[in-house]
Image: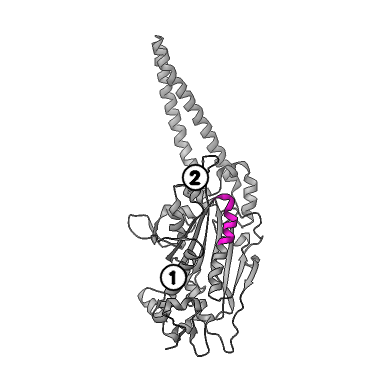
Amino acid sequence: MLDPKLIRSDLDAVAAGLARRGFELDVVRLRALEERRKALQVTAEQLKAERNSRSKSIGELMQSGQRDAAEAAKADVGRLKAELESVESQFDPVADELNAYLEGVPNLPAADVPEGPDESANVELRRRGQPPQFNFPARDHVDLGAGLGGMDFETATLITGSRFVVMQGAIASLHRALIQFMLDTHTRAHGYTEVNVPYIVNGASLRGTGQLPKFGADLFRLEGDSDYWLAPTAEVPVTNMVRDRILEAAALPLKLTAHTPCFRSEAGSYGKDTRGMIRQHQFEKVELVQVVKPETSWDALDELVGHAEAILERLGLAYRTLDLCAGDLGFAAARTVDLEVWLPGQSCYREISSCSNFQDFQARRMHARFRNPESKKPELVHTLNGSGLAVGRTLVAVLENGQQQDGSVVIPEVLRGYLGGMEVIEPV
């Protein structure tokens, strides 16, 4: 959530910043709500002060023998209490409406985020690695998986429905090996602490990271009395580990990594990426989350991007790094850097990780703070996260980039130790 003080002090500048990302702030409505809220707050404070003053005078009047005046003061206190209750009953709906509106307002783009309305304006920062050159027509992962006997979409549709997959044999083992490789790299080489978190989250957690209320249609909610939802990304449970907490400065930066399944309804994406594993209702990620002091968050974003890039480089996969324009930013992000891996089967780069700095946007929603050792007062932390990496898409990339003319797939060297020394997956 944006800082209410910033909205009150410079509403036009906030509106201009949000317009960069295509969001039209209802300035007239906000000003009216804020003026009403402020007027009611001032009236309530005046009534409280007057009530407290009259209450204090009752004892003094009684001690001085002015019983009639004391009784009149008691009557005034009763009147003031009733007036205060009336004002407070008007204040709460206004404050609730204001907060509800602000919950749906996205983060401000950082000042140096590229201008642009959509992904067409994203800026390529660099490319690493060379896409493989085949002397045969490249297959996509669906055809490769079928030939290897380890990727079955028809059975998954029978079990559940579309946009699910059953993996078996060497491909299932390769999927597991990728998870272990990513976790080992991030914990042993990059300094993250591995955590194992619930796959089911409550509504407060989703509001904390910004998925609710705006993106409820993209989520799976469980039936029953409890406010339970399937986690759409490990970002939600891992980041909420610091919700309603005041961390000691010495505990920062907090660097956490987790492997979890992710569940998304993919509302609004019908007809898009329906073939294979690119866009599914259930997929797995190894997530990176950092909780840092405000002055270090931009350096932390560079570091986090480098950690995700390291996985692609160790796997020998060609990729490119993009700075997203303002119009392509996610709801909570102040800046996002995407990694796209080369997929021979589609002859293009496809997203495999998004790394974002949310600054204090999520922290304000979560009441996540640290104690500043200089001021001794709690201050909001900054939060960041990124995929390190999306496991299913990495599996797709490994299969398609490692394919041979006979339909076999060469396994990247860094994964072979996780697979008992296996070097090639042979077709059945």
Q: Is residue 14 magenta?
A: no
Against 15, residue 135 (above or below) is: below
Against 352, residue 191 (above or below) is: above
What is the number of the mark on residue 387? none
Element at badge 1?
helix
Q: How is the image coloured?
A: one colour
Q: Is residue 274 something one can see in this rendering?
A: no
In the rendered image, residue 63, in percent from the top left (x then y), is placed at 39, 11
Outermost residue to the top: 65
In the rendered image, residue 156, in percent from the top left (x then y), is placed at 39, 76
Question: Is most of the magenta stretch helix, strand or loop?
Answer: helix
Q: Which residues are magenta?
A: 293-303
Element at badge 2?
helix
**Residue drawn 46% across the image and 79% down it:** 416
Question: Could you tell me which quadrant the C terminus lies in?
Answer: bottom left
Residue highlighted by disc 2: 97
* Mark closest to the chain's N terminus, 1 or 2: 2
